[in-house]
Amino acid sequence: MALEVKFPRKSGKRGNQGLEKLRIYGGKPLVGRVKISGAKNAAVAILPAALLANDTCIIDNLPYIDDVTTLADILHELGAKVELDAKGRISINGSKMTEYRAHYDMVRRMRASYYLLGVLLAKFGKAEVSFPGGCAIGTRPIDQHIKGFEALGAKVELEHGVIKVSADRLIGNEIYLDVVSVGATINIMLAAVKAEGTTTIVNAAKEPHVVDTANFLNTMGASIKGAGTDTIRIKGVKELSGCSYTIIPDQIEAGTYMIAAAATGGDVTVVDVIPKHMEAVSAKLLEMGMEVIEGDDEIRVIGKQRPRKANIKTQPYPGFPTDLQQPMSVLLSIADGVSVITENVWEARYKHLDEVVRMGGNVKIEDRVAIIEGVERLSGAPVTATDLRAGAALIVAGLSAEGITEISNVDHIDRGYEDIERKLVDLGADIERIDENGKSRRLKLVTSRQRAAVGAGL
Ligand code: UD1
């Protein structure tokens, strides 16, 4: 059964992105202001969470990315009324839904479809969701999600690639997570929000998108306390109602542009961000000799000199985010000196460095540690994005390199970065998209005066 596609991709025809490429003519410093979109990782939790309301939820500041259009399609296929507009707003009403099964064709394109388990379990007392697809960044177990559902009284079975969860009643319990997991924390919150009694998640993830999802649920009438700390308490409520909500800015997108500014010796202000969410990245860039100027809701990064070496250890929030390890490793590849990265979250998150080596990088990898001896400059080459953030890293590499870099498997990048070519062109990058027939699509620079004339306001 093929998924009926209702919501088009913003960047072009659906289904052929695997064959598209981004071609970057490198070596141009990025300069200017870039507006950061809504957070992908919050959106992919909040959209399914909206199904729990007895009325319409209107969600604003939605990033118009492929993960979101895919999810909108899935929710529509499940029987929810979904409307998406080009201004980054979606309305969702799941009150008439009866479907509790999400088949493989729906979920294979996105990892975060596991949130449907928690949501449908809370809504119907049962859910059947195919084991999800998504980024290939190592084994991605969901044992902690399952442990949480079971603690609430659900029966969980895996049959023919489908996870089946069911419960006559969900009853609050204390759940200690063996690993700090964003997905498990959010999924347990979703399942517990209408359970009887109180659920406590101990050793919970503290990421901004965990807090945003809790805030959204609370706006619908849930009773969740402690999100953003390592203990979250969820007092079950009988009903959740419709609401309006604005998604937080994307911490990872902002960090990617900050790192790209440093890598190109540029001067970029990321606009509409929450600087507190960016502290780990800002601190590293400062340590590397970059100028970082924080405003109330913007951060300016000036790459005045060659970056100095630095050591990075990825950690759950508020530590250095694993999703920025990949772009940051490119910056370290052109830093002065030897840097050490320890990837503590995912075990196979260095595939992009094979490509960076092909661009002249000097890297040694031993298990979770990458030792990077900085070179003066990378040189452009044909490369392949193996996952979303690997794609972002290769864009940073291409922008900073001398010559032409052609990145294949652009579909990974389109899953998570809204309007990436538009934003980069407006910052002065020389970038074009090559379609599956080898035809180039190159966006024109829009000046700030033109933008102001159409009210974009940057
Ligand atoms: C989310 C993010 C992803 C980010 C990751 C870590 C979304 C949609 N994706 O992914 O971009 O890289 O957080 O910040 O928000 N683990 C288990 N058992 C489980 C669950 C996780 O062992 O049941 C392990 C994982 O293998 C991994 C670590 O816990 O080593 C963290 O994973 P988790 O935080 O769950 O990642 P995701 O929620 O999948």
Image (cartoon, grey):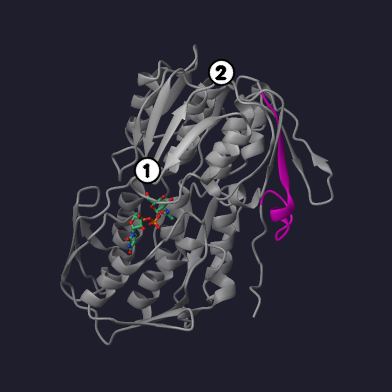
The amino acid sitting under disc 1 is Glu
Q: Could you tell me which residue is drawn at 22 percent across and 60 percent down?
A: 178
Work out which quarter of the rendered image holds the N terminus and state it: bottom right
Q: Nearest the camera: 238 or 283?
A: 283
Taking the image as shown, residue 398 lies to the left or right of residue 239, namely right
Q: Looking at the image, in which quadrant does ligand 1 appear?
A: bottom left
Q: Within the magenta stretch, is there residue 23? A: yes
Cβ of mark 2 under 8 A from ligand 1: no
Q: Could you tell me which residue is drawn at 49 percent across and 15 percent down?
A: 306
Q: How far, Cα to Cα, is label 1 from label 2?
A: 24 Å
Q: Is residue 307 visible?
A: yes
Cβ of mark 1 under 8 A from ligand 1: no
Upstream in sequence: badge 1 or badge 2 = 1
**Mark 2 lies on residue:** 376
Q: Nearest the camera: 387 or 127?
A: 387
> Where does the image place residue 164, in percent across and percent down from the top left?
40, 82
